[in-house]
Image: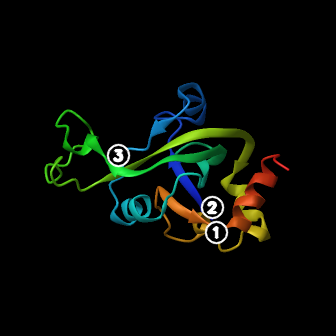
Amino acid sequence: MTNYWLMKSEPDVYPYSQLVADGSTHWDGVRNYQARNIMRDDMKVGDMVLFYHSNTKPPHVAGLARISREGYPDHTSWDPNSKYYDEKSSPDNPRWIMVDIEPVEELQVVSLHDIKDNPNLEGMALVQRGQRLSVQPVSKEHFEEVCRMGGKQ
């Protein structure tokens, strides 16, 4: 059974266009336990992702991606030269997890404003007050509605 997710990236850090150019990437640097647990326990190969550009005007869904490798230790957490270094994480006792994703399809921009204005997306985690997770679940219905808004039939 396919699960659906939304993953946030700042476009000046790693935009959807870079994922397309790279063909796949590891999703490193997640330092929130709830998001880590999602990547470790729930994300499976084949699950679909709304790739969301945050911290930009306007914030928006830019494209679709797919989980191509399930959770494994985030090696950036034990690299002292990484901005994601965590002295409490090590290869013997990894604290953080990452997954790999691959691009599927670019969408027409679906802005946060448009998502909030769509009554079919009421209850979507992204629009919930205080919801700031960089990795979050999306229902199949909400995923399909965002895809429709982005020009995918």
Q: Position of residue 109 (x, y in %)?
A: 72, 43
Residue lying at the far right in this picture: please name it.
153
Mark 3 is on which residue type?
Answer: Gly
**Can you say which quadrant of the picture contains the N terminus?**
bottom right
Q: How many numbered circles does the render carry?
A: 3
Label 1: which secondary element = loop
The residue labelled by disc 1 is 124
Q: Position of residue 106 (x, y in %)?
A: 70, 38
Residue drawn 29% across the image and 54% down it? 96
| Nearer-the-camera pick, 84 or 20 | 20
User: Can residue 32 be seen by looking at this rendering?
Assistant: yes
Badge 1: residue crowd in 10 Å (few <14, some 14–19, many ≥20): some
Going from N to C along the chain, the mark reached first, 1 or 3, is 3
Mark 1 → mark 3, Cα distance in angstroms: 24 Å
Going from N to C along the chain, the mark reached first, 1 or 2, is 2
Mark 2 is on which residue type?
Answer: Thr
Q: Are marks 1 and 2 in contact (CB under 8 Å)?
A: no
Label 3: which secondary element = loop
The label on residue 77 is none
Mark 1 is on which residue type?
Answer: Met
Residue drawn 35% across the image and 46% down it? 29
Mark 2 → mark 3, Cα distance in angstroms: 24 Å
Going from N to C along the chain, the mark reached first, 2 or 3, is 2
The residue labelled by disc 3 is 29
Image height of 25 relative to 142, above or below:
above
Mark 1 → mark 2, Cα distance in angstroms: 18 Å
Q: Position of residue 7 (x, y in %)?
A: 53, 52
The residue labelled by disc 2 is 2
Badge 3: residue crowd in 10 Å (few <14, some 14–19, many ≥20): some
| Nearer-the-camera pick, 68 or 31 | 68
Q: Position of residue 38 (x, y in %)?
A: 44, 63
